[in-house]
Amino acid sequence: MNPTTLLNDRESLLDLLREWAVRGWLRELDVALARFFAGLDPDATPLLLLGAALTSHQLGRGHVCLDLAATLKNPDAVLSLPPEGETASATVQLPGELLCGLSLEAWQDALAASPLLSAENAPLVIEGARLYLRRYWQYERTVSDRLAAFQQAAVNVPPDLESRLKQLFAFDNPEQKQACAIAAQHRFAIITGGPGTGKTTTVVRLLALLQTAAVAAGQPLAIRLAAPTGKAAARLTESIRAQVNALPVADEVRATIPREVATVHRLLGSLPETRHFRHDKQNPLQLDVLVIDEASMVSLEMMANLLDALSATARLILLGDKDQLASVEAGAVLGDLCNAKDAGHIAVLEHSHRFGSDSDIGKLARAVNAGDATTARELFRKQKTEDRGQISAVDNPALNELLREGYVPYLQALKARSTFTDDEEWASNVLAAFDQFRLLCTVREGPWGVEEQNRRIVQTLFPNEKRDWYAGRPVMVTRNDYSLNLMNGDIGIALELPAPEPGGVPGLRVVFPRNVGNPGLRYLHPSRLSEVETAFAMTVHKSQGSEFAHTALLLPDARNPVLTRELLYTAITRAKTRFSLIESGDGVFEDALVRRVERYSGLAG
């Protein structure tokens, strides 16, 4: 149909959106929203309904808004329609064809007159060339306004700052000392850097700096630490404890620095089955300093909730790697804030103590960050041949061998029960052995996705196993379960145990580490776990906040919009000692290397 007709006839436009959804280009939710708005405003123009559907579509892809100007400049690429790898049909209008010749002013005019935008608390908001669903516009305003207020507010800088810094940083690390000084002089600060650059070391000394002055004044600070996932919280807890014990401060100061890290959801007090939290603007958190680790994983919505729950006098310190993947949900808050014009409150740590100048993993991560494909390829050529594999078919035996080799320590740990006098010690050893290796995938579905690779690994490691639940099955929790005290991302392993609980029944139990700060294990019957999936392989997104001795990244055989430089960097930096790249098609790695994560929002200014 002629584009002009489509943009002047509501039903024709809605039919086209429906056709896009049938083909999997849009979600059913996107089309339903357009139809809902058509019912709310009988005079809504086709361009408004199209804008609403595409705004929803972009939200599903991690963008906070629909950038009208960028969309008009290159519609098919900005919207990724049709999805990369799919062939366009001659019978279906593409966004580029539909919007050809449309001006930004014409689209804005078609939006502005509708009560869906003009009425008080209207469901859509337009700001310049950005079209938002109101809820996400409000989240963005909350984050922007609260952080601006934080930066403008006066802050008590500890006296004798330079001499105190010299005492805390007796070791020679001017980069970390400078980062600590920057954060001490701002109510809101960001400390960003890659793995091993000393973010935790810096923030612990920052807390000691602030707390020393507060204790001397007789008013110790209430400090809380949080991270987006249970795994990230557990890792930070372990690191914090070691750092605090080594601080060159008085015992009374050391005692006031927390050693436990909560998940963000637990900190705010999630209200089950809602998007709301116990702590909010009306019931703020009772704290003076809040530290959030792995801040790149925090979505716009969660950051807005956090800021709403902070008092105007609190300090906020974000720790994270600005070069990592953005949050799974909408927004790229840490990246946007680090790219904002005002960077005086941001400290960047660049020297990695984990990946030194001689570390091939460190060199590879730096090459990827720089988009240097030549250096990256040279590093793979220098390494053992098994650290870069070309897989030409899904059932390639070489991949099976790599997977078998990677999970050998885990299989050995499963069989080593007789060498332990205590079942809990054995179970803890199994959990630790499982974290020695992980296969990371870039997608969930298809021959190269998580679901198929988990099936492959089970067939490789447990060829005779046909049951859903069996001894040795690792599972990841996929949804917060407050009744069981399990969070999204928690990993447990099914083990055959005699009687985990006193008076309990012998049999299969899924063993999870207890929550942060609570040593030991928990034993749950499989029937109690409804929202879990096998976790031999996981997506790169799900791996954030984790470390493995050996990480293998499996790339698909075709280019895909999810394959980006940030994804490669995140996967590489999950590895502590060895990284393997498994490719199934030429040029996919290079294409990902030049593609950057771009999330449309107004937060960066």
Image: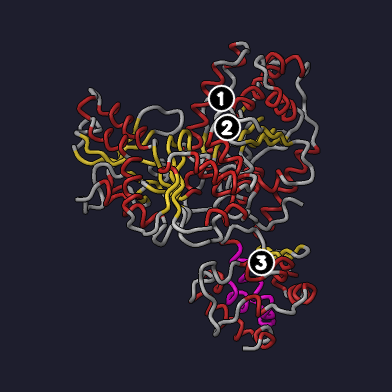
Residue 402: quadrant of the picture: top left
Which residue: 71% across, 45% down?
Answer: 337
Residue 258's label in the rendered image is: 1
Residue 282 seen = no
The answer for how far apart the CA atoms under marks 3 and 2 are is 35 Å
Pointer 1 or 2: first along the chain: 2
Which residue corresponds to mark 2? 225
Marks 1 & 3, CB-CB < 8 Å contact: no
Which residue corresponds to mark 3? 123
Counting labels gives 3
Which residue: 42% across, 43% down?
Answer: 385
Front residue of 326 and 381: 381
| Amino acid bearing label 1 | Pro
The answer for how far apart the CA atoms under marks 1 and 3 are is 42 Å
Front residue of 275 and 259: 259
Q: Please check the rendered image and state whether residue 47 is part of the magenta-colored stretch, yes or no.
A: yes
- Give, as a single range, the part of the protein colored magenta: 33-58
What main secondary structure does the magenta stretch of the protein show?
A: helix
Marks 1 & 2, CB-CB < 8 Å contact: yes
Pointer 1 or 3: first along the chain: 3
Measured along the vertical axis of the image, is residue 561 above or below residue 154? below
| Amino acid bearing label 2 | Leu
| Amino acid bearing label 3 | Pro
Front residue of 14 and 441: 441
Pointer 3 or 2: first along the chain: 3
Q: Classify 10 Å Cα crowding around label 2: few (below 14), some (14-19), many (20 and above).
A: many
**Residue 66: percent from the left, percent from the top?**
67, 65
Q: SS for tag 3?
A: loop
- Discs 1/3, front: 1
